[in-house]
Amino acid sequence: MKLFTIGDSISQGFRSLAAARTDQSYSTLIARVLRADPYRYPSWPHGGLPVDLELLMRRLESRYGSDIGGFEWTTVLQTINGVLDEAEDYYERGEGNEHRPYPSDDRFWHNTAFWGATVADAWQVTPAVCKQSILAAKNNQDEFLGPPNAAFYRTALKVLNPQLDPALDGISQLGWLEQHAQDKNEGVENLLLWLGANNALETVLRLRIQQTPNNPSNRPYRLGYFERKAFGWNLWHPNDFAEEYEQLLSEVERIMARNTQKNWRVFVGTVPEVTIAPVAKGVGETFKIDGSTYYKYYTYFPFEEEFALTTKYQLTTQEALHVDRCIHQYNDTIKSLVKAANARAGQQRFFVVDLCKALHDIAWKRNDGQPQYQYPSYFDFIYPKVDSKYYHADETGRLRQGGLASLDGVHPTAIGQGLIAWEILKVMRAAGVQVHGVPINPDALDWRAIFAGDSLYSSPIRIMKELYQHPRLAEMLVKLFDAWLE
């Protein structure tokens, strides 16, 4: 097996708040450059889980054009509910429900990433856990403005056990890695390992911090899965993260040491600064701290400082800085653990891909509108240009800003996924990965196809201006977003 992936939402191809386009994820792009055939992954009908914001916005556009008129506002919620109902019907009661095997005969996927995964979920989330959680959330009635219930577990179930084989109900992401590594006919040649963002991401999704307690006798990963989830933590204390990640890397090291593929490599991604995500809009006074620009408050896009002051939706400068400093410590831990693993192996088997730095350098506001990132040469003369700001297109269908982050303001577009692939491929080339005896070439990415396949870029959404010019739609979506996170 040339390539195997363990990760979370970005690795899965999650975008615009849904697991939808694994075919456009960075790992799939890398598999094509590697000529890893087969490289199997699931697809997600009806926009995927939990809610496809792009599908929702395009439905609004198809009904109302680029403007929502006065009386039409009375029908907007019904239009939104129609999109949600289609997904709810399919994933709760239709062909995509928890009792129907995936329609192909695939027993496993080469990409085992699923959205929402924390570090410990790599071994704690199994199909059995998913089935238990889906059963507990069971509700066969339509919910107005509600996405499919237990959406996280429905996604993870079909990733980890697509044929719903009871014999595989105890298998996790690490369990699949072990099965493939010990396969006498293949083994695993290259492993992409990128986890840790969800140990901090909800701080910007919910705009509040619930930090783990840093209790040496009771680290979060030592708790049972459901016990750990009940606490509602969304930011791991660096010491809690360190022990959890050490457990992850120790298991990967153990599994890969028994790999039947002797010339194996593991590529480990660092944790991005979640506060640079455009969903968390910086408002108010700015401050230069640790060489980066921070804002007085962070609130949901597209609102301004007054919204942050008059609602619960805010993080302060100090809170955002605290989250970032925790993440910087996470990454110091990852680099230290990788170094120790290579020392034990007596050679370099693990390679750090510093995606935190790459995404920091891309960030528009964090760099005072002067991003330091060096894009591939293909980007030199593209028009319209892309950047990391929140997506916006005008009523004529012209892209005004953004293009790297999808409509949830967190996850990358197809173009953003391409840049992540490019960063990883550069490290793979330096690590000596070859394709048919030739060093792997990061510039083998088909950027023309990536841009053409990015629907937000190639077919901008004209109704986006309603989010900018009229707060009514934005406020409506924020309330729904808040409810969907509960």
Image (spheres, rainbow, N blue to C red):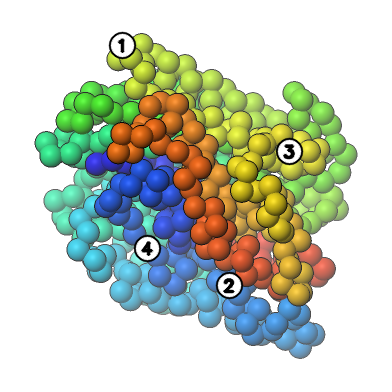
> Label 4, label 3: how many angstroms apart (C-alpha)?
34 Å
Secondary structure under badge 4? loop
How many angstroms separate mark 3 from mark 1 (CA)?
A: 38 Å
Bin the neighbour count of mark 4 within 10 Å (Cα to Cα): few under 14, some 14-19, many 20 and up.
some
What residue is shown with label 2? 56
Q: Are marks 4 and 3 in contact (CB under 8 Å)?
A: no
Q: Are marks 2 and 1 in contact (CB under 8 Å)?
A: no
| Of callouts 4 and 1, the N-terminal one | 4
Q: Is residue 254 visible to us here?
A: yes
Left-right relation of 141 to 80: left
- Position of 444 with respect to 206 (left or right) is left
Please determine whether, in this image, residue 192 is positioned above or below residue 431.
Answer: below
Q: Residue at x 67, y 36 (%)?
A: 373
**Disc 4/disc 1 C-alpha distance (Å):** 40 Å
Cβ–Cβ under 8 Å for marks 3 and 2: no
Query: Does dot 1 land on a helix, a strand or a loop?
Result: loop
Q: Which residue is mark 4?
A: 43
User: The disc labelled 3 sits on which kind of residue?
Assistant: Pro
- The residue to which callout 3 is attached is 371
Residue 112 vs 70, above or below: the answer is: above
Location of mark 1 (residue): 346
Residue 22 position within the rendered picture, expressed as x and y whole percent measured from the top left: 42, 56
Name which of mark 3 and mark 2 comes first in the sequence.
Answer: 2
Query: Could you say whether the residue bearing mark 3 is in a helix, strand or loop?
Result: loop
**Image position of 256 with respect to 444: above or below:** above
State the residue at coordinates (34%, 22%). Answer: 349
Give the crowd class for mark 3: few <14, some 14-19, many >=20 residues within 10 Å: some
Upstream in sequence: badge 4 or badge 2: 4
Q: Can residue 300 be seen here?
A: no
State the CA–CA distance, disc 2 to disc 1: 52 Å
